[in-house]
Image (cartoon, rainbow, N blue to C red):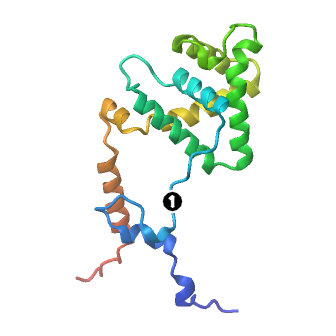
């Protein structure tokens, strides 16, 4: 059996061509790739309070950006990340947030839930749980920490504080990709 070239209909792949069509001067998604930003994962009032408590405990303090706007953006971004996850994983993380919120009471270390504690004390609890002898608890803390901090460090205010400018880097990588995809020049020119 000899292989045949694909027909023109099968050869066109909008997903792969869309980014090249956008060009290096534009970082927005191409309208033909079908991507849309997810709505935030639905959380009830208790789960949202638990999420806010975990965000407060995990995000850096001191001179790091910590305004209410940044914290709201981190909450919305975290909920959007949950929407992109497999439903079972998102549900488990939601349950894990509630578990972490109640853990100070369940371990008889505090009378209040995590979201009602002072930021320093809540942060100390999470640091202690990250070193727990129970692997499931360590993995839960690691998963929630990864989820929250990946959104926090992607905020524009945090980029400015770190003096990090990702846009020029992305433009450079897009230009490099275009150069790689360009047809090779004839060697005999």
Q: Is residue 139 visible?
A: no
- Viewer-side residue, 80 vs 181: 80
Left or right: 119 as drawn, with respect to 125: left
Q: Which residue is mark 1?
A: 36
**Figure quadrant of residue 30:** bottom left
Can you give x and y, in whole percent of width and height, for residue 83 in the image? 62, 48
Q: Is residue 78 left or right of residue 165?
A: right
Q: Residue furthest left?
A: 189
Above or below — where is 26 with respect to 48? below
Secondary structure found at label 1? loop
Q: Is residue 187 left or right of residue 32?
A: left
Query: Whole-percent x and y of residue 180?
Result: 37, 67
Badge 1: residue crowd in 10 Å (few <14, some 14–19, many ≥20): few
Residue 157 in the image: x percent, y percent? Answer: 35, 34
**Where is residue 111 drawn, in percent x and y?**
69, 8
Q: How many numbered marks are there?
A: 1
Question: Looking at the image, is 123 positioned above or below residue 18?
Answer: above
Task: State which quadrant residue 179 falls in.
Answer: bottom left
Location of the C terminus by quadrant is bottom left
């Amino acid at each position: 059996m000899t292989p045949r070239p694909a027909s023109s209909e099968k050869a066109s792949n909008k997903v792969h061509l869309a980014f090249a069509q956008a060009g290096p001067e534009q970082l927005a998604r191409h309208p033909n790739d079908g991507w849309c930003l997810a709505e935030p994962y639905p959380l009830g009032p208790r789960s949202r309070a638990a999420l806010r408590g975990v965000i407060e405990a995990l995000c850096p303090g001191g001179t790091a950006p910590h305004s209410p706007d940044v914290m709201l953006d981190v909450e919305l971004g975290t909920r959007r990340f949950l929407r992109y996850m497999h439903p079972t994983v998102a549900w488990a993380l939601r349950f894990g947030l509630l578990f972490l919120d109640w853990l100070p009471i369940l371990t008889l270390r505090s009378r209040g839930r995590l979201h009602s504690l002072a930021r320093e004390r809540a942060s100390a609890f999470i640091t202690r749980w990250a070193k727990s002898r129970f692997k499931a608890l360590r993995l839960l803390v690691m998963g929630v920490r990864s989820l929250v901090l990946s959104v926090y460090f992607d905020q524009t205010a945090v980029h400015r504080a770190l003096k990090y400018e990702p846009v020029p880097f992305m433009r450079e990588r897009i230009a490099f990709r275009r150069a790689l995809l360009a047809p090779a020049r004839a060697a005999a020119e």
